[in-house]
Amino acid sequence: MSQLEAVDTLVIGSGPGGYTAALRSAQLGMKTAVVERGQIGGVCTHVGCIPSKALIAEAQRYNLHRKWNKAVDSAPFENAQAFKQAVVNKQAGGVDYLLKTAGVTVLKGEASLVDEHKAAIKQPGTEQMISFKTVILAMGSRPIELQALPFSGRILSSTEALSLFQIPTSLVIIGGGYIGVELGQMYAKFGTKVTILEGGEQVLSGFEVDLAAPVIRQLNADGITIITGATAIKAEQDADMLTLHYLKNQEQFLTTAEYALVIVGRTPNTDGSLGLERTGLQVTSRGLIETDEQCRTAIPHIFAIGDITKGPALAHKASYEAKVAAEAIAGKPSIVDYKAIPLVVFSEPELASIGLSETEAKEKGISVIIGKSSFTINGRALALKASEGFVKIIADQASGIVMGAQIVGVEASTLISELALAIEMGATVEDLAMTIHPHPTLGEVIMEAAENAVRKIMMNR
Ligand code: FAD
């Protein structure tokens, strides 16, 4: 065992939480090391956000060419996989470069906490010790495995589903959350016969019915079969096929497919050989680590960020918390404020949501005004042949302050940032309505939804 030099900040895990924390810590003048047992960049870069969005973009391009009778690639899926890998490599290289130039020490291996101020970094055949003043835990999460459908053979997690080398003829997806819908639609656009099995009443259950409806219509148009209120109970596999048994309305049914893809959520990496117990830190029943508004755990020099903490498991939530944690360690008064975390589904059409929804406002008894406008006659949307969808803004009735927004439609993922800024800045619908938006752009629909809210507020006065 060799002794490494001591650092001010040790970061465990190099996903969007970990690498951002390491960068910010080094920029603030602290001697920083980040340790990674897998690949630098974590889940997001290698088996999450980036590869999925690269494949989705390729599937959409392929589908458009096919629809418009343009010459299509003879090996579209194989080439999409190669493109995806090139994107991932470039992004991972970028993270590596940023860490190096910021002076962060990158350690390869599995970190195991020895006590409150020491960790062992283990690799096959070697073990190094490192001591730290402060540690930021950013170990991320892994796919939840169902006891009845353990990952093996034809039963895949999202990780394997992003790395198939041949387009499957058929796929049954268990779980109609955002990842299931994104990957299902991607495969359907490449020609796979996709079935989505969802336990709840609607796929994308986190979204209101009117928002999910245009996406569900498109999923149906893409040939995807959606079975709601269904619970997968077991599967049998042979050399070519998988038979999945499921329950619906207390009756048993079966469906066959080449692969089953189980996407029913993620579980935090706070167990195993990490040794949290040696620091005295407790986890919740779901394995999460509790933190305060500076991402500090019950032990003042131990911080936790990203998927191992409460809240949505999203890359931008992890990197946001990373900045707060590093700044708190440097003695700055930074604190988290979760009122404006965007949630995006990269489906076709895209879905995006931020802050309070209309349903939540009703449940909480908050008096709100809903401003709405659609893409139907927006010039830019028409030119893009993508005029389905709308923007909905939720504003406080008395003050007009923007409290939430949802968008379904083309480029919702990009458009939602304007509303994130509005909420962050405490802007009113009048501010949005009186902001000059360039013409012809999709952003004009946000301005029109805000104008609609302003008119309603005026009428109520
Ligand atoms: P992670 O990215 O999980 O990184 C944690 C790292 O810690 C891992 O690399 C792991 O190897 C390492 N590690 C764990 N334990 C140890 C240890 N003991 N020692 C050393 N290293 C360790 N989010 C979005 O915001 N937008 C999206 O579009 C999106 N798409 C997704 C698509 C898919 C298919 C999946 C699976 C996820 C997607 N996510 C998306 C979620 C996003 O990937 C995660 O929320 C994000 O990666 C969490 O970041 P993190 O830093 O907490 O941890």
Image (cartoon, rainbow, N blue to C red):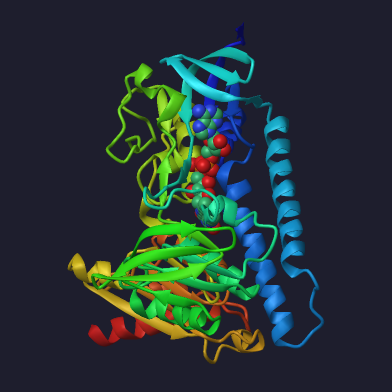
383 left or right of 195?
A: right
- Seen from the viewer's position, the closer of residues 348 and 222 is 222
- How many discs mark residues in the rendered view? 0
**At 73% across and 37% down in the image, what residue appears?**
97
Q: Is residue 37 visible?
A: yes
Q: Is residue 29 visible?
A: no
Quadrant of the snapshot with the C terminus? bottom left
**At 59% across and 84% down in the image, what residue appears?**
386
- Seen from the viewer's position, the closer of residues 379 and 207 is 207
Q: Position of residue 455 (x, y in %)?
A: 35, 86
Q: Position of residue 266 (x, y in %)?
A: 42, 48
Of all residues, the one furthest to the left in this rendering is 365
The answer to whether residue 364 is above or below residue 389 is above
Q: Position of residue 227 (x, y in %)?
A: 38, 74
**At 61% across and 70% down in the image, what residue appears?**
169
Quadrant of the snapshot with the N terminus? top right
In terms of image quadrants, where is residue 100?
top right
Q: Position of residue 45 (x, y in %)?
A: 62, 47
Of all residues, the one furthest to the front in this rendering is 238
